[in-house]
Image (cartoon, rainbow, N blue to C red):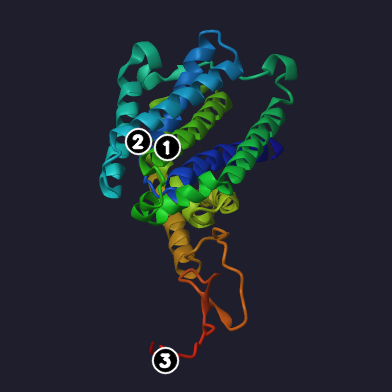
Amino acid sequence: MIGYLTTILTLVSIAALIAMALNIQWGMCGMVNFGLAGFVALGAYVTAILTLAGWSTFAAMAMAIVACSAAGALLSLISMRLSEDYLAIVTLGFGEIVRLVTLNESWLTGGAMGLPGIPRPFVGVIGEANYETFYMVFSLVIVLVVFLALDKSARSPFGRALRAVRDDDLVAASLGKNVLLLRAKAFALGGAVTGIAGSLQAFQFSYIDPSQFTPILTAYAFMAVIAGGRGSQRGLILGACSIMVLLEATRFLKDVIPFLDNAQVAAVRLILIGAGLIALLIFRPQGLLPEFRLAPARTDGDSPRRDADGDDTMVLPQSLPRRTETLHPIPKE
C-alpha cells in the first residue's frame, strides 16, 4: 500500500508540472496549447536517449529543458500572427508530428517498442529497497522549486504583462508591451517545464513508448487547470491532485461493478470524470482556488461588486466627489 501511494504522489508531481506549463501558456497568457503531450514526449525522449548514451541525470534533464524551451519559442514565432483558434490547430499538429516521429524513427526512438532500461538517477547510491520513496521526495522537491519560481514570476512585472496580453493584447500593445516577445517567452517557459515533466516520467518508468504521450495527456492537463482555477498557481496543484484522485479511484470500478468488461469500465471511468468536471463548472466555474486579483483601495462611498466568478475583485464608486466653482463675470476694460 505504501508503495502504491508513493507511486501516486510521484505521478501527481508529474501531472502538476504539466499543469504548471499549461497554466503559463494558457492560464496566464491566453495561448491554447493542444500539443502539450508532444512537448512532454520531446523531453522524455531527449532524456532517455542521452542517459542511455551515458550522460548524467542532470545533464540529460538540462538538455531536455533546452530542447523543449527552444521548440516552444520556435513554435510561437512561427505562429505569431495566428489567432487563438488557428494557434490551437498548429499546436495540435506539433503534438502529432512528435508522436509520429517517435513511432516511426525506430533507429532513434525504438519505434512502437519504445526505449527500455532508462537509468534511474542515484539508484546505485540509494539502492532498490528505498528507491521509490527517494524518487517521490526527489520529484516533490523539483515540483516545489518550480512552483516557487513560477509563483514569484507570476507576481512580477513579467507575470502582470502576461495577464495583460491575455485580457486584451491590443491594449497591452498600445501600452508599449511587446506582445509577440511575451508570447514567445511564455511558450518557452512552459516548454521548459514540460521538459522537466518528461524527464521525470522517463525516470519513473525506466521505459517510454509513443502510447504514453497521446492527446488524452493534454486533456488531463486542461482538466487540472480548469478544476484548480485558470491562472492560479496554487489552484492547479489542487486541480492536478483532484484529477489524479478521480483517475485512480475509478480504476477500481471493476471490483465495484463486476459485470462490466474492461472496455465498459474504461468508458464508465471517462463518463464519471467528465461528469465530475461538468459539476465543478456548474457549481464552481472559477475553479477550486481561483486566481487572485488585486482591487483598488476602497474609499468612502465605494462598494464592492462581484464579478462573474463570484469574487470581490472590482470596486465601483457609487458617488464621486464634486468640485464646484463660482463663475465670475469678466470685468470690462
Residue 109, relative to residue 156: is it above or below? above
Between 198 and 65, the one nearer to me in the picture: 65
Between 207 and 302, the one nearer to me in the picture: 302
The spot of residue 194 in percent (x, y) is: 49, 33
Three-letter code for the amino acid on which mark 2 is drawn: Ser
Looking at the rendered structure, the secondary structure element under dot 1 is helix
Q: Residue at x 29, y 43 (%)?
A: 87
Q: Are marks 2 and 1 in contact (CB under 8 Å)?
A: yes
Q: Earlier in the sequence, mark 2 or mark 1?
A: 2
Looking at the rendered structure, the secondary structure element under dot 2 is helix
Q: Earlier in the sequence, mark 1 or mark 3?
A: 1
Three-letter code for the amino acid on which mark 3 is drawn: Pro
The spot of residue 243 in percent (x, y) is: 52, 50
Judging by the rendered image, the residue that carries numbered circle 3 is: 329
- Disc 3 residue crowd, few under 14, some 14–19, many 20+, Cα 10 Å: few
Between 157 and 144, the one nearer to me in the picture: 157
Q: Which quadrant of the figure contains the N terminus?
A: top right
Most distant residue in the front direction: 333
